[in-house]
Image: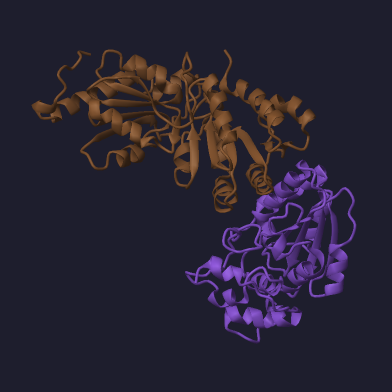
Amino acid sequence: MTITEEHTRRTTAAYDYADLPALMGRMTGDEKHGPAATSTLDVLWVLYDRVLRVSPERMDDLDRDRFLLSKGHGPMAYYAVLAAKGFVPVEWLTGFGSYDSPLGHHPDRTLVPGVEIGSGSLGHGLPIAVGTALGLRAQGLDGPAVWALIGDAELDEGSNHEAIAFAGPAGLARLHTVVVDNSSASHARPGGIAARFEAAGWSALTVDGRDHEALHTAFTAPHPGRPHVVVARVEPKYA
Amino acid sequence: METMRDRFAPVVTRLLDEDPRVAVVLAEIGADAFADAVRRYPDRVVNVGIREQLLVGAAAGMALTGLRPVVHTFASFLVERPFEQVKLDLGHQDAGAVLVSAAASFDWPAGGYTHMAPGDVALLDTLDGWTVHVPGHPDEAETLVRHAVAAGDDKVYVRLSLQANAHPLPVDGERLRTVREGRAGVVVAVGPVLDAVLTATEGLDVTVLYATTVRPFDAAALRRATEAAGTDVVLVEPYLAGTSVAAANDALSDVPHRVLGLGVGRRELRRYGRLEEHVAAHGLDARSLRERIGAFTAAGALLRPPSTAPERVMAH
């Protein structure tokens, strides 16, 4: 079956948060895959379920929100959420990482419906998100929100700091970043993540990355005239 | 004398007027020339500061929203420094942009090696889908910048240089142009080396082709030229020597042929000075070119059986 044929067979079943472990299990072979095993799962779910104005039918809509997964590593939670929300057929999940599957260990935007950027090499998503926000603004499209998800260790990459330092002074109010902080950076200081964004003029909130209400409140907090970062703290990777 | 780069900002400013998709992304270098444009189009002319990874990444993001970004800085900071952004943010994301470089291989010799980028075209050759324009005159630069911006969502590189020929030729953004016809070899002159090549080959019985668009390489035109002039081919390029040798070999893969690739040497000279001194140091002045092209074609004449040798070999 070709990708195109399969894609037209749109998944119609409604999936909920409780279904995500089973969807991820289709990729890992582990049905008991717990949400805690994936640092990004709750952030992704709250964004796709309650915040992002996106849907499978809107992917060509210039006025849609843009979610850019910069931390492309371990994308099982991302694919599970995309499947749950009908962007990709659930049947695709079982082929994860195989030659004929569009779902790789790093996502490819040209292969997966709903994926705005290919990622894998760290430090590319936030600069592209800056350009996306600039491009939308230049076309008078001030409705769409642009989101980039990065990891705390990914912040090591200097390209992020080029983007952070530019976006604040440029007043890119439609730009949002969520840093999933599982304390995986080798060299970091407590509070350092939010402080760096704040120093560049961003609005910054730090919340429990497993608390859906807290995430939603932080994601939807007003930040007039400034880009906004949410630092979502989860269990340390190397506890 | 007006340079290609003097022409660049006014042309792109007119394109900003003509096409609402066009945007300009800068990293300080060249920003002064766009001062008027940024006043008129503050959202479409963006200076990201001295941040070259962001320069290319932001351009890619703009392209993904439907804009046609024109990205400009020195070649060393446009292709070499953010090369992974060129590879991934444009190539892998399937996003288009027009990269317009300045300073070329050694336009500012007194600036030293940090501001020299003879390897830019060779680097882009490791990637798929790039169109590469190398104008040899400000008029040609204007035409090719317009071609590049109009090329849909293609990935296009335009290499501007202070080196230039005295007179422009018509360029179409695609094909090699025959400048001189001979029967004992083909010399392909790329962009600003044309004048030196024409002087060097004065009196030699060679065809001279002029290339201002080197990728995709016009293989058909090279093949046609070899039908009358034979398959001894010399490439003279204003960037890394041998950059287009593989393309010429591919064009002639089913016939016996010889290819000589002349251009900028790999060795770091660690010299400052003037542009002409670097042209000479790399053997790209007319006298050096004549020696090397002449020796190559003369050796070819000796290799050929008498029945296929050219009827006359001009004296040097």
Residue B99, image x and y in percent?
58, 37
Say how many tags the image has. Answer: 0
Q: Is residue A235 above or below residue A198?
A: below
Residue shown at the point (75%, 62%) measured from the top left: A54
Q: Is residue B78 above or below residue B112?
A: below
Q: Quadrant of the C terminus of chain A?
A: bottom right
Residue A118 visible in rendering? yes
Residue shown at the point (28%, 34%) measured from the top left: B259
Q: Quadrant of residue A121?
A: bottom right
Q: Quadrant of residue A55?
A: bottom right
Chain with brown colouring: B
Q: Is residue A235 above or below residue B133?
A: below
Tint of chain A? purple
Residue A219, image x and y in percent?
84, 63
Residue shown at the point (44%, 40%) measured from the top left: B122
Residue A144 or residue A24, whichever sits in front = A144
Residue A158, image x and y in percent?
66, 51
